[in-house]
Image (tube, helix red, strand yellow):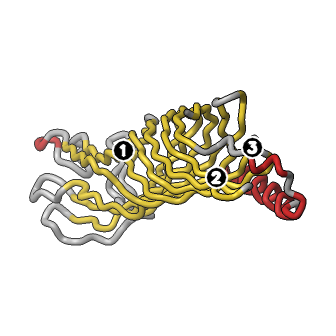
Amino acid sequence: MKKGFFLYTLAGVLLTNSAQAENGVSNTYSSDIWSGNYVGISLGSRNVEGDWTTTSYQDPNGNALAFGTNQNTNIDSDELFYSIYIGRNWQIKPRILTSVEGSIGNASNNETHVTIPGVNIDYVPDFSFIQLEEGIEATLRGRIGYLIKQDIHVYSGLGVAAMKVDISATCPADTDFCNPSRGTQHNSELKILTGWTASIGLDGVLQKNIFWRLEYSYADYGDVDFSGLPAIAGESFGFSSNMDYVSDTLTLGFGYKF
């Protein structure tokens, strides 16, 4: 949420100043330069936070074990994010815009955590590791905007989001967690997470039919379960986990209204 602090503050100041001047709205605001279809591209940074909790830990016979270390950890990554968006604006009042917009973007978020949180027999240099990878993210949202000037407006959006994630665990036959005779154990689960997204930003006219955009967006994907690695009699310990996923993105973009 830190990335969005500046935008939230700026939007608050702009909306306050605009509200104070509402009674003196110029007739120029009756000129509608925003309504219509538009398409654009954005580039920026996406931070994905995976709040990991190891929910169970078993010995090779499948018996539950008490956690030996903290079973919670944050697995975060920050990567270059690029996206395209398409939507339609309606200027419903001299200073008020509404719109519907869809977007799809991608970033190669990838982070590895050495050892399994909560497990007390997984020692360096013979260790297991977990890995989170996040890719394509898509949104569909409604927006409402307020014209600060005829050619610039502040807006907020709310809608639904989906993101592709790959969660994996690897145990390299380390003699601690896994028996070498079993060989390297690996489990990977590809999931499509869904949740809600909120955004705030500024759109401004650059020249006829071309506009710029500065936007912060936040998405919450809730909890996702991961089966981890199974306990195998005489061979390896086992675990399972749960994660809470959120992402926040700050981008600068350009669009074309047609």
Please tell me which of labels 3 and 1 falls first in the chain: 1
Circle 3 or circle 1, nearest the eye: 3
Q: Position of residue 151 (x, y in %)?
A: 75, 41
Front one among 169 and 29 = 29
Label 1 near label 3: C-beta < 8 Å?
Answer: no
Nearest to N terminus: mark 2 or mark 3: 2
Q: Answer with left or right where residue 220 lies relative to residue 20.
A: left
Q: Which amino acid type is marked by label 3?
A: Ile
Looking at the picture, how far across and down is residue 240, in whole percent?
Answer: 27, 61
Q: Residue 100: give x, y in percent of width and height.
A: 50, 52
Q: Quadrant of residue 110?
A: top left
Task: Give the numbered dot on residue 201.
Answer: none
Residue 1 in sight: no
Which secondary structure lies at badge 2? strand
Q: CA distance from mark 2 to mark 3?
A: 13 Å
SS category of the residue bearing label 3: strand
- Work out whether residue 151 can be spotted: yes
The answer to which of 212 and 199 lies nearer the viewer is 212
On residue 91, the disc is: 2
Front disc: 2 or 1:
2
The residue where tag 1 is placed is 131
Q: Which label is found at residue 152?
A: 3
> In percent of the image, x 20 and y 64: which residue is there?
59
Between disc 2 and disc 1, whose residue precedes? 2
Q: Is residue 205 left or right of residue 239?
A: right
Q: Identify which residue is drawn at 77% across, 56% down.
A: 9
Query: Residue 158 location, x and y as percent?
Result: 53, 59
